[in-house]
Image: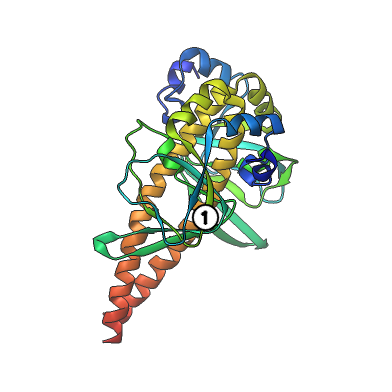
Amino acid sequence: MLADDIKKFDIFADLEEIEVKKFLQFAQVKQYKAKEVIFEQGDPGSGLFLILRGKIEIYIEPDGKRVSLAILKSGEFMGEMSLFGDGNQTRTASALAYESVTAVMISTLDFRRLQTSGPKILSKILLRLVVGLAKRYSTIKEGHKDLSNKVSELKNKVA
Amino acid sequence: MLVDDLQKYELFQDFDDLGLTKLMQFAKLKRFDKGTEIFKQDQPGAGLFFILEGHIRLLYSEIEDEIEIIDDLYDGDFFGETTLFGDVQDRPYTYKAMNNVTGIWINTLEYRRLQNSGPAELTKLLLRVIIGLANTFRVKNTEFGKLKKELEELQVESND
């Protein structure tokens, strides 16, 4: 994959071309067909995915009933939680290819190798991750607030 | 504050004495008394603030005397991250200390210096921030799923 192909994505926006090339030595390109399950809630975490093309649905199944959390599109990422902690992290939600998907994936092991051999590259990617996650967190917080209000209103109505 | 004192905070858990000393050459420890307006809405600012201890309320005012509470931030939360990419931005909100607040502040210029001369320390700091966010996500995702289910059940009940 050409460095130019991924340089256009926000998460790599701060990297020099040579840094993108170095990052790509640690990453793999993955392809998924529409409706293919990428990972399931509870699976061991294997790494970070950046979506290059296509859409991915993130969902959970509390009590067996499917609840969609988000549809991620080109330029967005997922699986970041598997990169951290003691290496025994499990997936907190499931991911399904909503349509045919091309993604770049860095495994937890390669991520740690990059931490040793390219900390500056990693620090640039991590800042973008922090900003992306903070935005996503803010959206979840808002959604949570709206949902809480709706539940309270309905509870009053039912009572 | 001594390096030993800082190590008690989760944010610095992965740092040894040397790494933390290096980090603190670029970051400033800040303390604010209850009631202090740390940053005011529409004033320019550039830098990242991490809350080590305390409660900060984000306030927004479009018309004088009409103040809206936007959010509450606590230990481990942070703000200002988007200012690290570019120019100085006007603060979108007023950041008010609701109790005594302790935090660390890295301005954009020092952040860039740290990125060049201490990328390993910066990586450790950012990883710890992401772990904090990841843990919060786990909790919020679970709560969100339960709330959605509760809402659906209530909708069925209300239609009956």
Please name the residue shown 40% across and 39% down the image: A46
Q: Which one is in front, B66 or B139?
A: B139
Quadrant where the N terminus of chain A is found in the figure: top right
Quadrant where the C terminus of chain A is found in the figure: bottom left
Q: Which one is in front, A120 or A108?
A: A108
The quadrant in which residue A62 appears is bottom left
Give x and y (percent) for residue A141.
Answer: 46, 57
Q: Which residue is mark 1?
A: A101
Give x and y (percent) for residue A20.
Answer: 65, 34
Q: Amino acid at mark 1?
A: Val
Name above or below for residue A63 compared with residue B85.
below
Give x and y (percent) for residue B103.
Answer: 53, 32
The quadrant in which residue B107 appears is top right
The quadrant in which residue A59 appears is bottom left
Query: Is residue B10 among the parts visible in the rendering?
Result: yes
Q: Which one is in front, B67 or A7?
A: A7
